[in-house]
Structures are given as C-alpha cells and as structure tokens.
Image: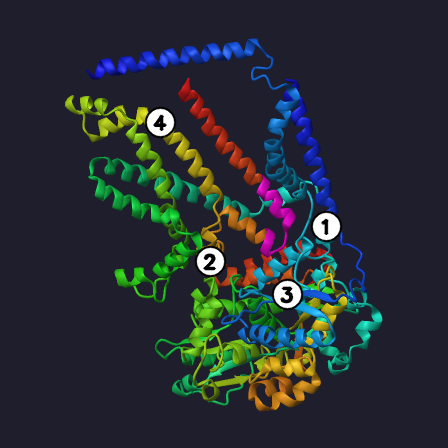
C-alpha cells in the first residue's frame, strides 16, 4: 500500500512540474503584457512597494555606507562637520582586537544558541511531542512559547532574578550562594537565555514540518525494523530538509542581529559577552563614534548577506 | 526589461533625494531670539535625568509640584496661557546624554534641558546648544539679576570658550567616606584623616578582618562610566601631581598614571580589598551604595551626592537609618603628602550641572524666563526642601549649608582645593579611555599593558603631539 501512495505522489509532482515548466516557457515567449495592465499602471502598482523598500532598506544602506566613510560623531565638532576619512574606519575596525573579539563571540553565540540550542532543542521537543497526547503537548508548547511571547525587557528581568549573585533563584536551588552567573559565565548565560527565548520558533516550524511526513512511510519503516535513528535519518530528514535550511537561515540571521543580551550583561564584564550588535551600540551611541559604528554596521550587513547567500545556494541545490 | 530600468531609475532618484535631504537635516537653522516673543499661548517642555520615585526624585517632584504650577500661575497673571510639561528620565548619565544628543541632532528635544557641565563643550561644538547671548539676545541674558549671585568659578561649569551657554544649578566636591562603626570594630580611629594612599590601604587591610565587610570601594571599570573617572581615576591622578589636562596637553602613560593603575591592581587584584564584581556588573555602583547603606562597606570615595541623595535616611535611593552617626568623611589624600597637584597634600574633583535652552525652541524668551525662574532664589530654596545641596547661588548657600555638616565641610574645606574637569569636547572620549584602562587592570591585565593601550588610544583621540607624560 505505502508504495502505491508514494508512486501516486511522484506522479502528481511530475505533472505539476510539467505544468509549471510550460507556464514558465510561455511567459518567456511572450515578453509582453501578461496581466493586461500596461506599463504605466504596472509601474504605478509596484511604486509604493518600491518607495517603501527605498526608504527603509536602500536609503539606510546607502546612508550607512556614506557615514562609514566619515568621522561623523554624536557630539562635538564631528557632529556638525564630519570629515571624509575614506577607509580609515574599516582599517581600524579590522585591526581592532575588541572588534575581532566581538566577531568571535558572535560566532560562538550564533553557533551555541541558534544552531545547537534553538535548532536541536526545538526539533527534539517537536519530535517528542509527536507521540504524546494532546494535553501534554499543549502544556509543553505553552511553556516553550512563553519564552517567545514574553516581552524581552520582562524576560531579561526574570533571568536577572534567576541568575543574580546575591539573591538569585539559581543559587538557592543549587546551594551556591554568591555565584554571580552573569559575571562568571557571561557567554554561557546569554547563550542559554537566547536558546530559551528562541526555541519556540524552531519547535513550531519543526512540528508542522513533521506533520507533513507521511505516517505511512514511518509505519513501513518501523515495520521493516528501523530504529529511532534510522527513521530520523532515512524517513524524516529527507522530508524536512527544506524546513531545516529555512529554519537555520532565519534563526542564524535573527541571532546574529539580536540586541536583547545587552539587557542581561551589557556586553560585560570587560567585553566578555560583547556580541556585534552590542559592540556597535556601545561604539556608536555610548561613545558617540557614529562613523566607526556605521562602518562596522556595513561589515555586519555584508556578513548577513553572505550567510543568506550560502543558505539560498543550499536550498537551490536541494531543489535541483 | 524596460520595466526593470524604469523601476531602478525611480528607486535611484528617491534614494538620492533622501540622501540629500539627510545631508541638509544636520545643518542648524539660524535662530531668532524674538521668535513668538509676544505669544499668548505658550507650550514648553523641561527635561532632566530625574524621575518621581526614582533617580533625583526630589528634583522631579520639585519640577512638577513647584516649578510648573508656579510658573503657569505667574504667566496667567500676565495674560499668557502657558502649558509646561516635564519629560522625566531615570537612567544612567550615558544613556541620558545619548537620548538628548539624538533629540537635539534631529531637531527635537525639550525647551529647557538639564545637562552635566562637562557636556557643554561637545554639545556646543556639535551645534546642539548655543550661547545664551545668541539664543535670547545679549541684553536679555545680561539683564537677569540672578547672575550676580553665581560665583564666576561656578559659572565656568556652563561656560565654553568664554561664552555662557546656560545657568549652572550647583556644584559638588569629592571626599573619602568611611563607616565609623566598622572602623571602631576594626580598631581604627573614628576621626580618621588619611595622609597618603598607603594610609587608605592599611585601614582597608584592617577592615578586611571583619566578616561580610568589603573594605574599600574605588570605582573602576567601564560599566560605571563617568563615575569611574570622577570618583576613581581622576581624584587619584591629581594626587600624583598633574591633572588630566595641563598646558593644552593631555596626560598620557605617565608615572602618575602608572601609580594610579598600580593602586587599582593592588585593591582588586593582589590584596582583594575591594569587590571585583561591583566593578563588572551593570548595576555595580548601586550595589556598592547598598552595601555602604547596610554598613557592609568600610571606605568609599564619592561626591556629596552619596550623602544627600543616596544614603539620605529620609529620601535616598539606599536610605541609611544611622547615616548621621555612622558616616564619617575626610579629605582625599595625595599619593603621599605634597605630591598632589600644585604641591597639595589633599585633593578633590568637582563637577556641576545646569540648564541650557534648546536653540530650536519655538519660544526662546519664554523658555529663558522659565529657566531663570527655576534658578531664582525662591525656587532654588524650594528645590532643596529639607535636603541642603551646594547650589550655584551664593545667597542661597549662605542660608542653607550651615545646617548640614558634610556640605558645609565641602564648601569650606574641599572647594578651595578642588579641580574641575577640562570643558573640552574630547574629554568624554579621554574619560572612556581611562575607564577602559582601569577595566583592564582590575580584570587582570598588567598595568604596563593597560597604560600602553591607554597611551595609544589617547594619541588616536587627541593626536600624538597633544599628549604629555
């Protein structure tokens, strides 16, 4: 039985593919007005979207590029008459040990909290929730979702209460009075915190991805004697590879750009949890060096684009 | 294909026009001192880093309960319908400064703004504030009667390049506070006056024997921001002979800086006389205040702010019930007798704050009227309430300071030996570099390395030619 159903599905997909190919070919043949709007009206239709993109995306990016080439400051004469300094900001950023340290911490942070923490934990919860009853599932999902729903200013306050050195809950539970977790293990603290915040998204995405795995295939794998790992590897993963990539892309970018850990450790102590967004905030707004901050922001935009490109490439190869 | 080209062109034009608009936006408009001078409907906003129930609560309550109703009533008598609002803040100085800089940069902000005197230079250079003579007119600014009550030395707090930018509302001084009860327990004199840094260290070493007591707090690290510079590194540095800025040059990797950083290394490293975590945590300064209020901290260098606004038993943020009997104070000693700036035995640092006018205010005359009203003798006395403070006005000081032992001590013994920070726009960057140097040292970097890094950073800020050792 399972075999026929999967054959049917293959047949259906190939029909759909053919149809798509045909429409594509058609549209390349007629390089004209498919919708019948006329050029002017077509432009009018996309103009609002384009204006928005220009105002909120292109303009800030170009502006950042320009600011990064100046010594623009928040106060002082550099605020009134910024001087053009060329690539000085980029040179000093790339040779600044504090920036390189921050970049490394960001890599650790993304790797630890997004890839290992959120992705794996989210998948694990989603996978385990497949085989429990609705009530348990509802309760677990509710608690995981809390981390995602609670406003970050509130949740950081709660984590402060948990990790505080003098009267923190964790110290009471572990009988380790006086351990200032945020100061002694700043990176661990923000990695665990960010995992807690973001796991809900991966869990939800993987839950719906797992629901799309045909139960018949799982069943036949089981009846063929496949263990949990074999089922995961040979049945589930091939089905949800696209979801894994999408999820990884989104949470990598979010984690790369998140500022919330600032509320927990303020980048300290002594820059030991100063991930890039925090580094830029301190440089540009606290120390008022907006030009330098803009240069590093642009470096960050480029890194973001590179991450996105890698994932999109991977997605394409998968589709082919 | 045509579509694509069109769209790119549209986007390009949009972007270009926005870029140009952005460029134009930063230029300051020419101000008109007489703008809306005769208006019958006036709206004004005051902002300060003060909030009811939190930071500088007394000032916030004074603005909302005294200044605003009194000023509005006085205006009503003149037939002017004035509506004044207060925009409160309750944050550290750095984010407050960032907030008002951004507001002024983008053409917004309150009409009357309370700022730290040390920001005057950088704000003026940025065009965020303008001399009073420009904002309200020479004749108006000079005519205010209160100016004659403000000592010229105190006027310097709001002066930059010989121009008065606002009205100072007070000054302060730093002393070394100690807990007499803890001193007694440790067998130390309760009328303590250290003569050198080593006197401080040896007292702290004795306090170390008391269980649960942190002997000494000298602010370090970048988390405390300017509090590290003003209560930590600068009072120590002037005790080694030279201020941070002398003869148009900034102090670099000097012998004085090395001894200062050595002292930090001793306190937080080898001898463990201070609590390292307070220097690292985001709210470390508050933690040290709380410990002092709970009789758990022996010695701390602070300004009169600690006494009147933090451990004040009636309205402080960390009220100390036994403040009046338990807290002692002394002058901050130089490294050793006579090594202080100008050959002094004792040193201190002072700052001050005041109000400035937003040069883009819609009602410059009325805003000036509000600001002078806030600095009238009656209003200043109302601001103090039962908590005296060193105000900018001599007439008020002579009436209120006598009732407070610490403030009269500072006015009499500390202000004559004190030093003000240079009112230059590079100062805050130099200050940050100094904070980072202490941060590295207390976190284990060698003094030599921290001093070299500081020297390099300083040269980057002010230019190698403007540094002395």
Q: Which residue is labeled 2 in the image? A: A269
Dot 4 lies on which element? helix
On the image, the x and y values in percent for residue B233 come to: 58, 69
Mark 4 vs mark 3: same chain? no
CA separation in Å, label 2 and label 1: 36 Å
Task: Specify the subunit that label 4 lies on.
Answer: A
Q: Name the spot of residue B336 as percent of width and height, x first.
A: 58, 79
Say if B296 sits above or below A90 in the image: below
Q: Chain of mark 2?
A: A
Say whether disc 1 or disc 3 marks the residue closer to the N-terminus.
1
User: Can residue B423 be seen from the camera position used here?
Assistant: no
Q: Which residue is mark 4?
A: A241
Left or right placement of residue A257 versus residue A123 in this view: right
**Of discs 4 and 2, which sits in the foreground?**
4
Which of the numbered marks, if any, corresponds to residue A199? none
Q: Residue A142's spot in the image, x, y percent? A: 30, 46
Residue at the location (46% across, 58% down)? A269
Find the residue positioned furthest to the right.
B139
User: Percent x, y for residue B441?
Assistant: 51, 62
Residue at mark 1: B26
Check disc 2 and report its element: helix, strand or loop: loop
| Picture quarter with the C terminus of chain B | bottom right
Tags 4 and 2 touching, CB below 8 Å: no
Is the C-beta separation of discs 2 and 1 under 8 Å?
A: no
Q: Which region is colored magenta?
A: A284-298
Question: Depth check: A210 or B154 in front?
Answer: A210
Q: How many marks?
A: 4
């Amino acid at each position: 039985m399972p075999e026929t159903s999967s054959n049917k599905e293959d047949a259906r997909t190939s029909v759909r593919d053919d149809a798509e190919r045909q429409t594509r070919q058609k549209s390349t043949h007629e390089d004209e007005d498919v919708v019948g709007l006329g050029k002017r009206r077509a432009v009018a239709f996309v103009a609002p979207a384009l204006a928005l993109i220009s105002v909120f995306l292109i303009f800030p990016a170009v502006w950042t590029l320009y600011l990064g080439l100046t010594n623009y400051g928040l106060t002082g004469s550099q605020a009134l008459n910024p001087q053009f300094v060329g690539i000085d900001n980029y040179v000093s950023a790339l040779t600044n040990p504090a920036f390189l340290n921050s970049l490394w911490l960001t890599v650790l942070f993304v790797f630890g909290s997004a890839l290992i923490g959120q992705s794996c934990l989210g998948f694990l919860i989603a996978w385990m929730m497949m085989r429990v009853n609705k009530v348990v599932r509802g309760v677990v999902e509710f608690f995981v979702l809390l981390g995602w729903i609670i406003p970050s200013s509130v949740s950081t306050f709660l984590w402060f209460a948990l990790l505080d050195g003098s009267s923190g809950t964790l110290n009471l539970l572990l009988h380790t009075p006086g351990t200032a977790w945020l100061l002694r293990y700043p990176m661990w603290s923000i990695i665990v915190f960010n995992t807690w915040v973001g796991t809900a998204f991966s869990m939800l995405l993987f839950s719906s991805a797992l629901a799309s795995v045909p139960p018949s295939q799982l069943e036949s794998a089981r009846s063929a004697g496949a263990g949990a790992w074999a089922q995961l590897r040979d049945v589930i993963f091939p089905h949800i590879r696209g979801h894994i990539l999408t999820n990884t892309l989104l949470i990598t970018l979010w984690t790369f750009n998140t500022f919330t850990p600032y509320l927990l450790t303020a980048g300290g102590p002594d820059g030991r949890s100063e991930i890039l967004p925090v580094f830029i905030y301190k440089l540009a707004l606290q120390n008022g060096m907006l030009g330098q901050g803009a240069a590093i922001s642009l470096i960050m935009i480029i890194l973001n684009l590179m991450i996105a490109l890698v994932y999109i490439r991977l997605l394409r190869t998968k589709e082919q | 294909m045509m579509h694509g080209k069109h769209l790119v062109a549209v986007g390009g034009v949009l972007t270009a026009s926005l870029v140009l608009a952005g460029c134009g936006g930063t230029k300051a408009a020419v101000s008109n001192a007489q703008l809306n001078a005769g208006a019958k409907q006036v709206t004004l906003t005051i902002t300060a880093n003060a909030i009811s129930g939190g930071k500088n609560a007394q000032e916030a309550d004074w603005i909302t309960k005294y200044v605003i109703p009194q000023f509005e009533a006085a205006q009503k008598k003149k037939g002017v319908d004035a509506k004044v609002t207060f925009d409160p803040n309750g944050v550290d100085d750095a984010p407050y400064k960032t907030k008002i800089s951004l507001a002024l940069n983008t053409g917004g902000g309150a009409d009357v703004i309370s700022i730290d005197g040390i920001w005057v230079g950088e704000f003026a250079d940025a065009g965020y504030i303008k001399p009073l003579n420009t904002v309200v007119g020479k004749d108006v600014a000079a005519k205010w009667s209160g100016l004659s009550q403000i000592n010229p030395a105190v006027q310097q707090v709001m002066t930059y390049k010989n121009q008065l930018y606002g009205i100072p509302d007070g000054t302060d001084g730093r002393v070394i506070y100690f807990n007499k009860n803890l001193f007694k327990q440790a067998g130390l004199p309760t009328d303590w006056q250290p003569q050198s840094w080593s006197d401080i260290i040896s007292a702290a070493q004795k306090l170390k024997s008391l269980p649960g007591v942190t002997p000494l707090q000298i602010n370090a690290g970048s988390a405390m921001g300017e509090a590290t510079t003003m209560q930590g590194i600068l009072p120590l540095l002037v005790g080694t002979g030279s201020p941070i800025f002398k003869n148009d040059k900034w102090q670099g990797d000097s012998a004085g800086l090395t001894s200062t950083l050595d002292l930090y290394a001793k306190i937080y490293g080898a001898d463990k006389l201070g609590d390292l975590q307070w220097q690292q945590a985001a709210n470390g300064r508050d933690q040290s205040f709380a410990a002092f209020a709970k009789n758990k901290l022996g010695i701390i260098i602070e300004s009169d702010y600690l006494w009147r606004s933090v451990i004040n038993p009636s309205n402080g943020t960390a009220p100390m019930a036994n403040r009046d009997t338990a807290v002692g104070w002394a002058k901050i000693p130089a490294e050793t007798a006579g090594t202080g700036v100008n050959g002094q035995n004792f040193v201190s640092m002072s700052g001050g704050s005041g109000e400035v006018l937003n040069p883009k205010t819609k009602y410059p005359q009325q805003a000036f009227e509000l600001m002078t009203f806030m600095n009238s003798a009656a209003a200043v006395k109302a601001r103090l309430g039962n908590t005296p403070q060193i105000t900018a006005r001599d007439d008020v000081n002579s009436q209120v300071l006598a009732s407070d032992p610490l403030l009269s001590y500072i006015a009499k013994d500390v202000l004559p030996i004190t030093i003000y920070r240079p009112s230059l726009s590079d100062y805050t960057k130099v200050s940050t570099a100094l904070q980072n140097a202490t941060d590295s040292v207390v976190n284990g970097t060698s003094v030599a390395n921290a001093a070299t890094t500081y020297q390099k950073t300083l040269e980057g800020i002010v230019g190698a030619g403007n540094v002395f050792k």
